[in-house]
Amino acid sequence: MFRRLFGRGQDAPRSEEEARAEEQQVEQSLAKSRQGMFGRITQMFATDEPITDELWDELEEALIQGDVGIETTLYLVNRTKDRVNRNNIKKAREAREMLKAEMVSVFQEYADREPVVARPFVILVVGVNGSGKTTLIAKLAHRYKRFGKSVILAAADTFRAAATEQLETWAERAGVPIISRGQGADAGAVVYDAVNAAIERNVDVLIIDTAGRLHAKFNLMRELEKLRNVIRRRIPDGPHEVLLVIDATTGQNGVLQAKAFLEAVDVTDVVVTKMDGTAKGGIAFAISQDIERPIRYLGTGEKIGDLALFDAESFVDALFAEK
Ligand SMILES: Nc1nc2c(ncn2[C@@H]2O[C@H](COP(=O)(O)OP(=O)(O)OP(=O)(O)O)[C@@H](O)[C@H]2O)c(=O)[nH]1
Ligand SMILES: [Mg+2]
């Protein structure tokens, strides 16, 4: 179903067709998860058998194995059980929609913020190394460009060797300009140049890549604070979006690592990458609960078009899709 016409940075699908294509992408990226625990849950709730205590135990086990996390699992099982009892539901098949509704509600706890209108719209991308930041930036550049927005990138990961070159390659592929100073340069200086360039060239969207490999937490905080201050010197309400990137394949441990960023910077949204690479898509629930921010996008593959806006209902439907 077509639900969102206007995204915060004006990056939402423009038609039913585009929205449907994105839903299909999400569905495909969850194929492994459906073959794993979620397929088992679908089967458990696909019968006219009576609901038993064993069914609830099995559900609990499957959700935990699917990386939903213990707390969220218990919440889901208890809420669904209550609802089933209240409504006097007897057959497993009839309980399924109630389980799905509770799953959707987990994500909706952190609802979308009000749209922000700004130009340049500044997006800061943060996350542990290898989580998929640079790839996400390429996907976002491609996406905004497709929607008629002008984009400029800032290569502010000056820490890792070849990070700038990697972003340059993507920028070329996406057909957008990039501001860089190479490895070892001051990241603040890169951002300073990029903000000025974005303003002077009247660009719609500025997307900033950052280093994930800053060893000590203190360094991480200091660096991100510095970048934020550089942005605010010329754009006082920026950055308008701070995206925390989390790799779905790293499981609970990845969520724990990502939490360090919440102390370093005002994260507005989460992006879950590599959904296609895990059989434990339940990690999205754990992420939503632990990070306490809305999930904005899903990375569904390695290609530049493999990005979808996150929609709680489509996501849960896709986990339960019978195919
Ligand atoms: N399958 C899959 N692979 C992805 C996705 N997003 C990123 N990757 C891969 O993950 C790897 C790391 O991606 P990068 O974008 O370089 O990650 P990064 O966070 O910028 O890493 P650092 O710069 O080292 O901190 C690459 O091999 C990407 O192709 C995704 O949605 N699906
Ligand atoms: Mg990178």
Image (tube, helix red, strand yellow):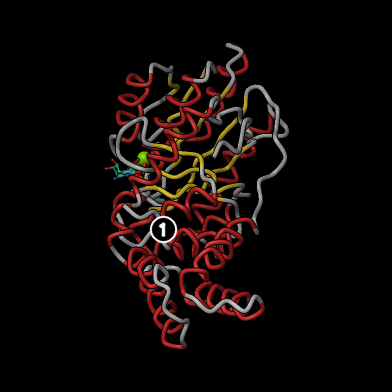
Q: In the shown orientation, is residue 116 left or right of residue 137?
A: right
| SS at badge 1 | helix
Which residue lies at the image location 36% right of the left edge and 73% below the top edge?
65
Q: In which quarter of the image is ligand 1?
A: top left
User: Percent position (x, y) of residue 108?
Assistant: 63, 56
Q: Position of residue 139 (x, y in %)?
A: 41, 31
Specify the quadrant that holds the N terminus: top right
Where in the figure is residue 63, as x and y percent of width and height?
42, 72
Q: Using the image, determine if residue 255 lies above or below residue 158.
A: below
Along the viewing direction, whichever of 49 and 128 lies nearer the viewer = 49
Q: In which quarter of the image is residue 98?
A: bottom right
Q: Mark 1 points at which residue?
A: 320
Q: Residues within 10 Å of mark 1 (few under 14, many from 20)?
A: many
Which residue is painted at 56% across and 27% down in the image? 192
Question: Looking at the image, which residue sits at the far top?
Answer: 201
Is residue 3 toward the left or the right of residue 314 in the image?
A: right
Q: Where residue 122 sits in the image (x, y, percent)?
A: 60, 30
Which residue is depicted at the point 33% across and 67% down? 37
